[in-house]
Image (cartoon, grey):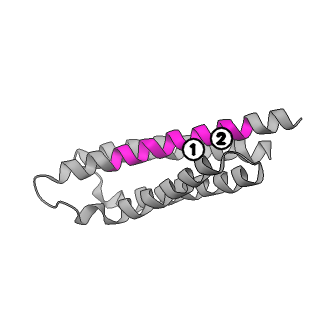
């Protein structure tokens, strides 16, 4: 399980970095044709979070925290999919900031769950 957790933590961090870079590029009005790439990588991040949550259940990590991570990944996917239609116009920047915050929170939750899984695996040895 340790190698799976390590791999998923790396994927969470790498996908998060790519998503933030792409998001900044879009926010400045460039490379808008790559938005589908951003969406696919965001989905990859969500899948990694769900896989970490499954491992968290198997490792008996706090059920509430595991549920939060799994639900947050779903919120992230849904919010990302509909955000272009929310508060269209001059106030859309508010949605963009919320989108960024939801994503950053997802990265933090994924990393925290990964740390808890690594700690649980270490204690099981």
Report the residue marked by disc 2.
114
- Report the side of 118 relative to 43 (left or right): right
Give the CA separation, mark 2 to mark 1: 6 Å
Label 2 crowding class (10 Å Cα cut-off): few <14, some 14-19, many 20+? Answer: many
- Would you say residue 67 is visible in this rendering? yes
Asked if the stretch drawn in magenta spans residue 69, the answer is: no
Q: Secondary structure at mark 2?
A: helix
Please tell me whether mark 1 sits on a helix, a strand or a loop. Answer: helix
Is the Cβ of the residue at disc 2 closer than 8 Å to that at disc 1? yes
**Image position of 46 with respect to 108: above or below:** below
Q: Main secondary structure of the magenta part?
A: helix
Furthest-right residue in this view? 125
* Magenta highlight on residue 116: yes
Q: Which mark is residue 110?
A: 1
Q: Which residues are magenta?
A: 99-118
Few, some or many residues within 10 Å of mark 1 (<14, 14–19, 20+): many
- Left or right: residue 114 versus residue 108 is right
x then y, percent, for residue 28 = 23, 44
Q: Position of residue 34 (x, y in %)?
A: 36, 58
């Amino acid at each position: 399980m340790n190698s799976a957790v390590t791999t998923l933590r790396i994927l969470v961090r790498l996908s998060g970095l790519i998503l933030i870079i792409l998001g900044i590029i879009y926010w400045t009005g460039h490379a808008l044709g790559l938005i589908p790439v951003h969406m696919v990588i965001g989905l990859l991040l969500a899948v990694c979070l769900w896989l970490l949550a499954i491992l968290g259940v198997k490792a008996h990590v706090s059920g509430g925290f595991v549920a939060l991570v799994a639900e947050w990944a779903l919120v992230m996917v849904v919010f990302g999919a509909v955000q272009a239609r929310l508060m269209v116009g001059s106030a859309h920047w508010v949605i963009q900031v919320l989108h960024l915050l939801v994503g950053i929170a997802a990265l933090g939750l994924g990393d925290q769950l990964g740390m808890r899984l690594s700690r649980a695996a270490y204690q099981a040895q």
